[in-house]
Image (cartoon, rainbow, N blue to C red):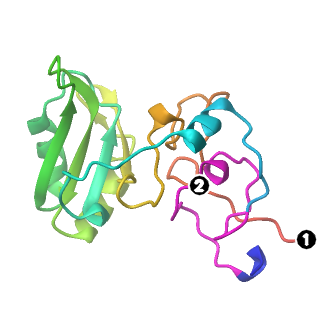
Amino acid sequence: MSWKETEFKKYATEYDPIKIGSIDVIVCRDSGTDTEPHDRAILRALHSEYIPNKQVKGDPHHTLFVARLNPRTSQETVQTEFMKFGKILHCRLVKDIVTGKSKQYAFVEFESSSSMETALQEMHKEYIDGAEILVEREAERRLEGWKPRRLGGGFGGRKESGQLRFGCRDRPFRRPIII
């Protein structure tokens, strides 16, 4: 099946480090224009092993990833900011297990997907405790093969000249030009 016959998707539905890191990718199920890794992070992602945390409960399709939080932001603050969009089943501010300090990201699980979608639209690039936050759908349990950024994966990076990853909200895939 060629990419012309495949439905175009703006956001990643599977996690392939070469496709996610390809600037000129043709997004479809089984093909992309890049076949070789073009940076060390992609090589790290391809060769790393990552096992998702099996202790995490809840529905990944109702869960948001909230990043770039202020180090002083508490779990209660995150919960208060997001509860205006609907009932929250679980909110977890991730902390370092040794120091107990915030790692500056959290997960918020909503009761319904409509509440989650509303919060996703409304809270992205908003400010909590003076810090501009990033809000994205949870990827670890939703995308097969997901690797976190520390292993060369992820979607992120603030610098345009740095690690570029596509298929997420800030850098969605672009529809290929058909000639």
* Label 2 crowd bin: few (<14), some (14–19), many (20+), radius 10 Å: some
Q: Is residue 9 left or right of residue 82?
A: right
Q: Is residue 56 left or right of residue 165?
A: left
* Amino acid type, label 2: Asp
Q: Is residue 133 magenta?
A: no
Return the x and y of residue 168 as percentages of the image width and height: 51, 52
Return the x and y of residue 114 as percentages of the image width and height: 27, 70
Q: Secondary structure at mark 1?
A: loop
Residue stretch in magenta? 6-31
The reply to whether the C-beta atoms of the residues labelled 1 and 2 are less than 8 Å apart is: no
Q: Can you identify the residue that label 2 sits on?
A: 16
Return the x and y of residue 27 as percentages of the image width and height: 68, 64
Q: Secondary structure at mark 2?
A: loop
Return the x and y of residue 47 as percentages of the image width and height: 57, 40
On screen, residue 31 above or below 137: below
Type of secondary structure dominating the magenta stretch: loop
> Which residue extends farthest right?
179
Which quarter shows the N terminus?
bottom right
Residue drawn at 60 percent across, 33 percent down:
41
- Could you tell me how many numbered marks the image carries? 2
Residue drawn at 52 percent across, 41 percent down:
153
Which quarter shows the C terminus?
bottom right
On screen, residue 89 above or below 156: below
Location of residue 70 by image quarter: top left
Q: Which mark is residue 179?
A: 1
Q: Which mark is residue 110?
A: none
* Amino acid type, label 1: Ile
Residue drawn at 63 percent across, 71 percent down:
29
Q: CA distance from mark 1 to mark 2?
A: 26 Å
Location of residue 87 by image quarter: bottom left
Q: Is residue 28 magenta?
A: yes
Q: Is residue 3 left or right of residue 18?
A: right
